[in-house]
C-alpha cells in the first residue's frame, strides 16, 4: 500500500536514409514446473512467482529462441533470473491469467505454472536505463518497515519520459510518477542526469511517499516505465490528499500492453519489495 508522506544484433549501416528493424510479435504459451526442496530458503509466494516468470521465459524462447551467452550460472536465485534474461524477447502482457498447480513428490514441492500471453522479439539493444530503490537511510533495499519513506534513483543515456507505478496486494495500481500536481500527464527526463524521485530535498515539486502494510508482511511490485519517444500516463482515479491516483491492476495491465505494442522502444522494468508491519508506524 502507499500513502503520501505529507500525511502519510548487429546491423550494417548503409548509405540509405533509415534502417528498419522488423520486430515479430506473437501469442505464446508454455508450461514450466519449478521444484522446491524442503530445506530451500524460499517462501511459497516467491516460488509461485518464479514458476510463473520461468514459464513466461519458456514461452518466449519457444517463439523466438534465446540469447547465446557464455555464462552457466545455475545456483541459488541466480538461475531463474539468468534464464529469464536469456529469452530473446519481452513479455508484453497476459492473454489469460496464469494457472498454478502445486503438488508434493519425493520430498519436494512442485509448482507447475501455465501461462498464455503476448511477446515481442528482441532484435536490437534497448536503452540501458539504470534505477534502484532506496530506503529512508539512502541504502538500496527491497525490505521496508510499514510507514517508512522510500525513493527511486533513475538515470538514462537518452532523453525521454518516465513513469513509476506501484502494484499493491489488493489488486490496485498506484501512479507515483508523474506526480499528482503535474497537469501534463507525463514526466520528462534529460539524458545522463541522476534523478532521485519522491525526494522534496532534490525536487521541490516532488511528492514524498510512505509504504504501508495491512498485514504482517505485504509484497508490492514497483514498475518503472521509460521511453525515448514520450508517453502520457494512463487514466486513473484521483486519490485524496493521503493517497496517489490509482486504478485497478487489470486496467493498468491493459494500458501497459497497449503502450508496449505501440512503442517498440518502451522499456518496462519491475522489482518486488516487501513491507513489514512494525510494532508502531510513523505518522
Image (cartoon, helix red, strand yellow):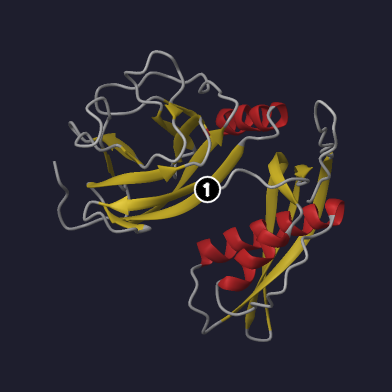
Which is nearer the eye, 262 or 129? 129
**Quarter of the image where one finds residue 114:** bottom right
Q: Which residue is mark 1?
A: 270
The mark total stands at 1
Q: Quadrant of the C terminus?
A: top left
Q: Position of residue 2 (x, y in %)?
A: 33, 38
Q: Residues within 10 Å of mark 1 (few under 14, many from 20)?
A: some
Q: 20 left or right of 113?
A: right
Q: Residue visible at 31% across and 48% down?
A: 213
Give the residue drawn at x 58%, y 41%.
Answer: 268
Where in the figure is residue 210, as x and y percent of width and height? 26, 42
Query: Is residue 113 shown to the viewer in this render?
Result: no
- Image-quadrant location for residue 101: bottom right
Outermost residue toward the top? Answer: 183
At mark 1, the secondary structure is strand
- The answer to whether residue 146 is left or right of residue 183 is left
Q: Position of residue 16 (x, y in %)?
A: 85, 29
Amino acid at each position: 500500500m502507499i500513502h503520501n508522506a505529507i500525511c502519510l544484433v548487429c546491423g550494417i549501416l548503409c548509405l540509405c536514409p533509415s534502417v528498419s528493424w522488423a520486430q515479430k510479435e506473437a501469442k505464446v504459451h508454455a508450461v514450466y514446473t519449478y521444484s522446491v526442496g524442503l530445506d530451500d530458503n524460499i517462501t511459497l509466494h516467491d516460488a509461485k512467482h518464479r514458476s510463473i516468470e520461468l514459464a513466461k521465459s519458456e514461452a518466449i524462447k519457444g517463439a523466438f529462441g534465446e540469447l547465446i551467452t557464455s555464462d552457466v550460472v545455475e545456483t541459488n536465485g541466480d538461475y531463474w533470473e539468468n534464464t529469464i534474461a536469456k529469452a530473446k524477447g519481452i513479455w508484453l502482457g497476459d492473454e489469460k491469467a496464469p494457472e498454478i498447480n502445486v503438488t508434493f513428490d519425493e520430498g519436494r514441492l512442485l509448482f507447475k505454472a501455465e501461462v498464455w500471453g503476448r511477446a515481442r522479439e528482441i532484435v536490437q539493444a534497448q536503452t540501458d536505463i539504470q534505477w534502484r530503490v532506496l530506503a529512508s537511510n539512502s541504502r538500496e533495499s527491497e525490505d521496508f518497515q510499514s510507514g517508512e519513506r522510500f525513493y527511486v534513483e533513475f538515470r538514462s543515456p537518452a532523453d525521454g519520459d518516465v513513469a513509476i507505478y506501484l502494484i499493491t496486494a489488493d489488486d490496485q495500481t498506484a501512479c507515483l510518477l508523474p506526480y499528482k500536481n503535474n497537469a501534463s500527464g507525463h514526466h520528462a527526463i534529460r539524458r545522463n542526469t541522476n534523478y532521485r524521485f519522491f525526494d522534496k530535498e532534490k525536487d521541490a515539486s516532488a511528492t514524498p511517499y510512505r509504504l504501508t502494510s495491512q498485514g504482517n508482511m505485504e509484497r508490492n511490485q514497483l514498475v518503472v516505465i521509460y521511453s525515448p519517444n514520450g508517453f502520457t500516463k494512463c487514466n486513473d482515479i484521483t486519490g485524496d490528499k493521503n493517497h496517489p491516483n490509482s486504478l485497478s491492476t487489470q486496467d493498468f495491465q491493459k494500458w501497459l500492453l497497449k503502450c508496449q505494442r505501440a512503442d517498440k522502444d518502451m522499456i518496462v522494468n519491475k522489482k518486488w519489495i516487501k513491507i513489514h508491519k512494525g510494532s508502531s508506524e510513523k505518522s
